[in-house]
Image (tube, rainbow, N blue to C red):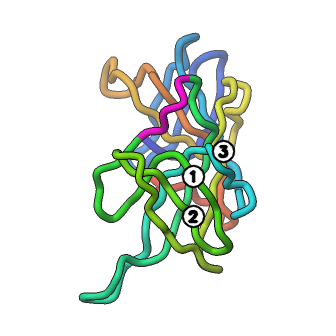
């Protein structure tokens, strides 16, 4: 579920979605992440990245990074890996100018170019206090009934400049 946080009452959050208001229960076990704007200099060796590439020219090499989500390495030191050919994810082995080297599933580095159109987001673990009225929320969990989701995880971010969160009319 995704949308804009309309109201907060203790551990219950009302989220405005495309289909109307829905409720999200934030439990003590809910993992809360916060996305904030980032930049290339936030990417360091050892950090984890999830990179979505821009469209490539037909028959050409893969496109540059369109979106990069940066997070700290987990305590086990292993970053999440993607098998999506349009994306790359894993641990950063180096940043060389406008190129990010990301370890693939075998540990070999994959070079991914970035450019002035690349959008960067820093993602960090936080507390439920980061959920504020007007912020954007993506929540996943167990649907208790038609209107209530018990959240396993939520990601919050500030509303975009246009003021409309993804998932809202």
Which corner quadrant of the image does residue 32 belong to? top right
Q: Is residue 157 visible?
A: no
Of the numbered discs in the image, which one, if any, rests on residue 93? 1
Magenta highlight: main SS = loop
Q: CA distance from mark 1 to mark 3?
A: 33 Å
- Residue 8 visible in the snapshot: yes
Spatial CA span between label 2 and label 3 = 30 Å
* Tag 3 secondary structure: loop
Mark 2 vs 1, N-terminal side: 1
Binning the other alpha carbons within 10 Å of mark 1 as few (below 14), some (14 to 19) or many (20 upward) gives many
Residue at the (66%, 44%) spot, across then down: 135
Label 2 Cα neighbours within 10 Å, binned few <14 / some 14-19 / many ≥20: many
Please state if 143 lies on the left or on the right of 133 as rendered: left
Query: Measured from the top left, where is residue 150 in percent x and y?
Result: 43, 19
Q: Residue furthest left?
A: 59
Please provide the residue range marked out in magenta: 76-80
Q: Nearer the viewer, mark 2 or mark 1?
A: 1
Residue at (69, 24) in percent of width and height: 127
Q: In this view of the protein, which residue sits in the foreground, 123 or 2?
A: 123
Quadrant position of the N terminus in the picture: top left
Name the residue tied to disc 3. Answer: 135
Q: Which residue lies under the disc numbered 2?
A: 100
Towards the viewer: 1 or 126: 126
| Residue contact between numbered discs 1 and 3, judged by CB atoms under 8 Å | no
Q: Say left or right for 5 vs 18.
A: right
């Amino acid at each position: 579920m995704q949308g804009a946080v309309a109201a907060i009452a203790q551990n219950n959050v009302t989220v405005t979605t495309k289909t109307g208001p829905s409720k999200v229960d934030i439990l003590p076990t809910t993992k809360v992440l916060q996305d904030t704007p980032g930049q290339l200099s936030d990417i360091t060796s050892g950090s984890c990245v999830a990179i979505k590439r821009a469209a490539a020219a037909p028959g050409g090499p893969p496109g540059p990074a369109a979106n990069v989500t940066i997070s700290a390495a987990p305590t086990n030191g292993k970053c999440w890996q993607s098998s999506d050919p349009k994306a790359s994810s894993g641990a950063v082995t180096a940043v060389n100018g406008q190129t990010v080297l990301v370890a693939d599933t075998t540990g070999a580095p994959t070079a991914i170019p970035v450019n002035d159109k690349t959008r960067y987001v820093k993602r960090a673990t936080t507390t439920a206090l980061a959920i504020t009225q007007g912020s954007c929320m993506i929540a996943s969990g167990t649907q208790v009934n038609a209107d209530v989701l018990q959240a396993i995880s939520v990601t919050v971010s500030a509303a975009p400049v246009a003021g409309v969160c993804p998932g809202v009319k």
